Image (cartoon, rainbow, N blue to C red):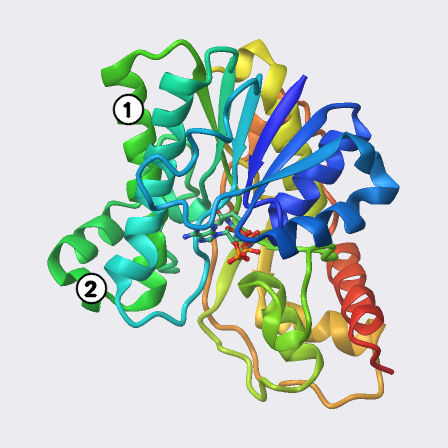
Amino acid sequence: PLVLVSGVSGFLGSHVARELLTQGYLVRGSVRSVKKGQQMKQILSSFGGERFTYVVVENIAVDGAFDGAVVDAEFVVHTASPFTYSVIDAKRDLVEPAVQGTLGILRAVATHGPRVRRVVVTSSVAAIRTDSPALPEGRSELDWNTPAMAAFNQLGKDTPSRIAYQASKTLAEKAAWDFMLKEKPHFDLTTINPPHIFGPTIHPCKSIADLNTSVKLIADFYVGNIKAVDPSVTFGRVDVRDVARAHVLALENPAASGQRFLVSAGLFTHQILVEILNKRFPGQKYATGVTTGSWIPEINTKSKEILGISEYIELDESIVDTVHNIKERFQMG
Ligand code: NDP
């Protein structure tokens, strides 16, 4: 079957394409430019790349942007969405593209994608919870990040970027489920909700500065750009290879229809990261300090029971593979 993967030249999108190709699917990836499409063709050439084609969708937020891209596809995986904390206008740079992009791809499928059976949207743990450490209990697929939506409703374009990113994911996912309820289209919807994603990159990147937001954090600690541990940081985390696998497992599983899946593999703090770096890549001076924030694990049983992800990649392995990949790609040490 042919799968349209939006944002295929991104960190996660490229891994989803690779996993799909490895499993024998045909993949059509959306990219912003011919140049990125050609780069992806080259990158995927050793993973069944003869089954990969690309389509240029310059801006997902533009009306009708996906209309041509969905034709003949049987499945759609929508990963494209801005993930950055350097924004000027939170509404224009984060929330609008996230919401318009998600609604745009669903509308395109409803009108131009008669063969599509399921759309899998990459949402986030950010749509489920705030990053406040003071949560009384572990979060699950039943929860929504209402504080981020409320903050964005109040502050609009001036919403601080971390909260605005959370609002963008919450509002985009909500818009998707509302669309399904209202329009009752011919296809069904599944969302995958990962926490911070680490792991080796395969997408086009010129430098550490050019890395995607979540992996750049690891690189910044590794190269010493960050001198002190932020004591309050406590996240969920997961490896990109597991998240890609979750998207592919969600495509054809009847029980995944209409479900959101939290794919969280465990705890991440700056202190734990520094401990792994000191142990596995000794000889450099890393950030100092300790974590004082507390964290209650997100509940991932649904991903195990329905998607069948019985084991998640351990944090050590994920970080070590990320650092090896950074060293190799950017020719360091
Ligand atoms: P990347 O920035 O690497 O990927 C985002 C992709 O979306 C890129 O291909 C980017 O294209 C594309 N994109 C963004 N805005 C637009 C736009 N306006 N028009 C067209 N294309 C656009 O980030 P990730 O791979 O990390 O993120 C992928 C998805 O996973 C996102 O939905 C993100 O919210 C979600 N997610 C990520 C987590 C993480 O820790 N990484 C955690 C939880 C969820 P280009 O690069 O050419 O600009």
From the viewer's perspective, is residue 3 above or below residue 291? above
Q: Quadrant of residue 259?
A: top left
The image position of residue 34, as x and y in percent, is 61, 51
Q: Residue at x 53, y 17 (%)?
A: 256
Marker count (numbered):
2
Label of residue 157 in the image: 2
Q: Residue at x 80, y 37 (%)?
A: 49
Of residue 140 and residue 18, the one placed in the foreground of this image is 18
The image position of residue 153, as x and y in percent, is 14, 53
Of residue 310 and residue 261, the one placed in the foreground of this image is 261
Label of residue 179 in the image: 1
* Amino acid type assigned to the residue bearing label 1 in the image: Phe
Indicate yes or no: mark 1 CB to ligand 1 under 8 Å.
no
Q: Residue at x 84, y 88 (%)?
A: 283
Q: Quadrant of residue 128?
A: top left
Precedes in sequence: disc 2 or disc 1? 2
Q: Do we see residue 260 in this rendering?
A: no
